[in-house]
Image: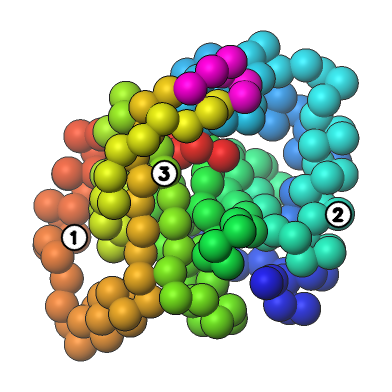
Amino acid sequence: MFPELTRDDVFRLETRRLWLRWPRIADATAILRLAGEKAVAEMTASIPHPYPTQAVDPFIFATRKGNALGDHLVLAITPREKPNDLIGMIGAHKQATGRPFIGYWLGTPHWNKGYATEAVQALIDTMFSLVEIDAVEADTRVINPASRRVLEKSGFRQEGSFLKSLPARGGLFPCEQFRLDRSTWAALKSWSASGWAPLPAAEQQQQADSFSEEPCLA
């Protein structure tokens, strides 16, 4: 599913404030510190709490191997001016449907700044631009309205609610399913290019700041 372009560790995405790049072993300390927080881990399907120190390096090796094989595209989220400083992670994963599934998390010091929305939009733009897919999917726990808002601001539409197995949480939990069709994405991109915006920038930021951008399911 993922093209050759993304399978080399020099691949990166740049946005106005962020640099999304392959994870590195040097990121281990930041991953352990940020992803290991209960507030971050409890919103995800796969991040344990507490995060075992010995699990970090194997996780990084697995993400890099999967990127190289084209099994997924998992990227570290970093500030553009400090690309060595990981503040979260985002990824697109294969599904049996053929549509990629988007998941992400951010460390708590970096909530309420719009970084999650910026990273999600960069990744979905990349997926629709480089891969022949009809839609991108995501989900979030029902107790995570901040991640719901991130998806909605990125053009996703809620498809319904369901119970999902969250292995690291130890059971089934209510979640909301979201989907972004290619046609909707193309329309949003064309409207943006023509000067259309859903809200003035100042109001967008004010609205974003009213939510804690907690992590989506990873």
Residue situated in front as seen by the camera: 208 or 178: 178
Q: Amino acid at mark 3?
A: Asp
Q: Residue 118: horizontal and vertical position, in percent?
A: 41, 57
- The answer to whether one can see residue 16 in this image is no
Mark 2 or 3, closer to the camera: 3
171 drawn magenta: yes
Mark 3 element type: strand
The residue that disc 1 covers is 201
Q: Is residue 38 left or right of residue 46?
A: left
Q: Are marks 1 and 2 in contact (CB under 8 Å)?
A: no
On residue 139, which mark appears? 3
Sequence-earlier tag: 2 or 3:
2
Q: Is residue 101 left or right of residue 73?
A: left
Name the kind of residue labelled 2 in the image. Lys
Residue 139, compared with residue 215, is above or below; it is below
Q: Are discs 2 and 3 less than 8 Å apart at CB?
A: no
Q: Residue under circle 2?
A: 65
Q: Position of residue 72 (x, y in %)?
A: 70, 58
Report the quarter where the N terminus lies: bottom right
Q: In the image, which residues are magenta?
A: 167-172
